[in-house]
Image (cartoon, rainbow, N blue to C red):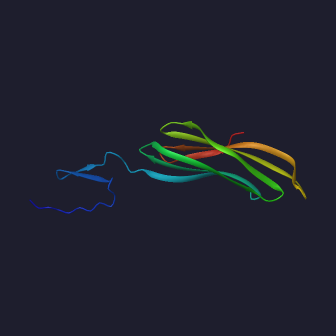
Amino acid sequence: MKTHKIVLTSMATLLIVSGTFLPSAKPEATTKTVSTYAGSTIMWSKNVVTFTYSGGSISKSSAIQNSGAIFPLNMSQKGIRKTQSSSSMQTYVGTYTGSGGIPTPWGNANLISQTRSLRTIIHGNGSYSGGWIN
């Protein structure tokens, strides 16, 4: 019997059992970072979600907020939370308050303020979507 040496580039790709090649029982997990951006060049907000998925399921995920504005405008982060969770889909909602005002020696005197929520939906196949919800 002749013995052959096989080198695998990915350990999860193939299993060798009694000289027969079988596909792996579990596909390799992939980690992806996605962003949902809203705003303009002078005032913006962004949800950043990192998730690990495999075979149509999400095994773990986390999210952070990012925002900014050019003075005298202001964009405040009010928190991001997971609002829906299943093995194949998860939803994160980040809340932001945008405001604008007049600069004073004591800080910015806001003339207008609006609070809105930005949603990011991730799927177990690696796709995502998002946008303002209110």
The quadrant in which the N terminus is found is bottom left
- Asked whether residue 39 is in view, the answer is no
The quadrant in which the C terminus is found is top right
User: Residue 73 lies in what quarter of the image?
Assistant: bottom right
User: Residue 71 lies in what quarter of the image?
Assistant: bottom right
Residue most extreme to the left: 1
Number of numbered discs overlaid on the protein picture: 0
Residue most extreme to the front: 106
Residue appearing at x 62%, y 45% in the figure: 130
Residue 98 placement, left or right of 117? right
Residue appearing at x 62%, y 50% in the figure: 64
Residue 46 placement, left or right of 126? right
- Asked whether residue 53 is in view, the answer is yes
Residue 128: give x, y in percent of width and height: 56, 46
Residue appearing at x 35%, y 46% in the figure: 26
Residue 91: give x, y in percent of width and height: 58, 40
Decide: is 7 above or below 108.
below
Residue appearing at x 54%, y 44% in the figure: 122
Residue 41: give x, y in percent of width and height: 74, 59
Decide: is 115 above or below 102.
above
Residue 125: give x, y in percent of width and height: 47, 45
